Image (spheres, rainbow, N blue to C red):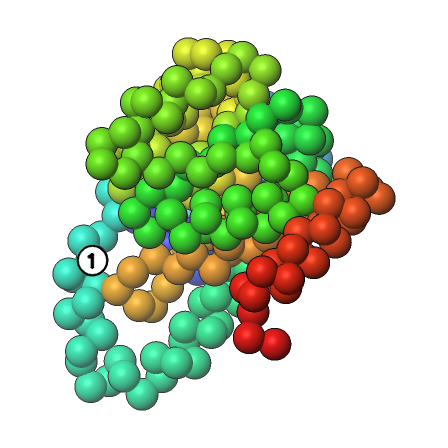
Amino acid sequence: MPDSFDQLAALIRARFSELSPQFQMGAAFLLDHPDEVAVSSMRKVAERAHVQPASLVRLSQQLGFPGWNELRDLFVARVRTRPEPLTSRARSLVKASAKDALAHDLLVAQQHNLELTAAHNARTTVEAARVLRRAPHVHVGGFRSCYAVAFGLVYGYRLFRSSVSLLTGEAGTLEMQLRGIDRDSATIVISFAPYSVEAVRVAEAALEKGSKLIAITDSAVSPIALNADKVLIFSHESPSFFPSLVAATAIAESLVAHLLALEGAGAVEQLEQAERALHAKGAYVA
């Protein structure tokens, strides 16, 4: 019987071709939506996977578990597991055996992260874009390593919409910036485990004030996702010492692209004006 989610995932991949069509559908859902499995009932998981609840029980037993609850415990443990310290991952990188394949392994991991993230968010990205479009003002918060993702989102979005703000909290001013969030606005928060205090505070403020909340995060049960209106999940696995933010950046870029498409000709005109102004003011060398 597998002792961890990673062992279970490896077992499913190894035996997938041997499983019946019903079991394959159930097993695929387990691997593609682990966060949902952790927080949903067996009946709900079966409904989402388009299989019978009894099939999940039999699948669990075929994978070596007494029943569904024992299998689901691995998914719950996965959600609760704290991330490995960065120093532990860094030490593994300096080993001679790890250096040779590192560049290749990084690219493979990033490609896998993008594929998983795309599979999770195809429909939700459009839904989130519609929520943002309806809001008179959009606030975006990302802190520490997620600052770059938030900044990139705001930079692209502001090229065709002026009513978008970056929450930065410089010089201890986050609480003052949060005063600008109101009931009609929308708020985007970006964070992954271990979740920054500032990101959680922004999510709490958005909920307190009735702002629509869009979470870009790594788990459906992260502290910024639990009460969000829309949750966009990104995968950040990496052989490096630090989690990869490639997929989070892809979500941000996808959101901006969908927003431009939804706004239509008016947004294109705003973008054209911004582009002309940047060139006229000497923002670029050529």
Along the viewing direction, whichever of 159 and 60 lies nearer the viewer? 159
> In this rendering, would 235 be left or right of 261?
left
> In this rendering, would 21 be left or right of 112?
right
> In this rendering, would 156 be left or right of 169?
right
Could you tell me the amino acid type at mark 1?
Answer: Leu
Residue 100 rendering spot, x and y as whole percentages: 31, 88
The C terminus lies in which quarter of the figure? bottom right
Rendered position, 204 above or below 153: above
Residue 224 rendering spot, x and y as whole percentages: 40, 29
Mark 1: which secondary structure? helix
Residue 46 visible within the image: no
Along the viewing direction, whichever of 155 and 13 lies nearer the viewer? 155
Badge 1: residue crowd in 10 Å (few <14, some 14–19, many ≥20)? few
Residue 206 rendering spot, x and y as whole percentages: 45, 20
Residue for point 77% across, 38% down: 263
Along the viewing direction, whichever of 254 and 225 lies nearer the viewer? 254
Along the viewing direction, whichever of 193 and 276 lies nearer the viewer? 276
Residue for point 47% across, 74% down: 107
Give the quarter of the image for residue 212.
top right
Rendered position, 118 above or below 211: below
Residue for point 32% across, 22% down: 176
Residue 232 visible within the image: yes
Where does label 1 land, which residue? 86
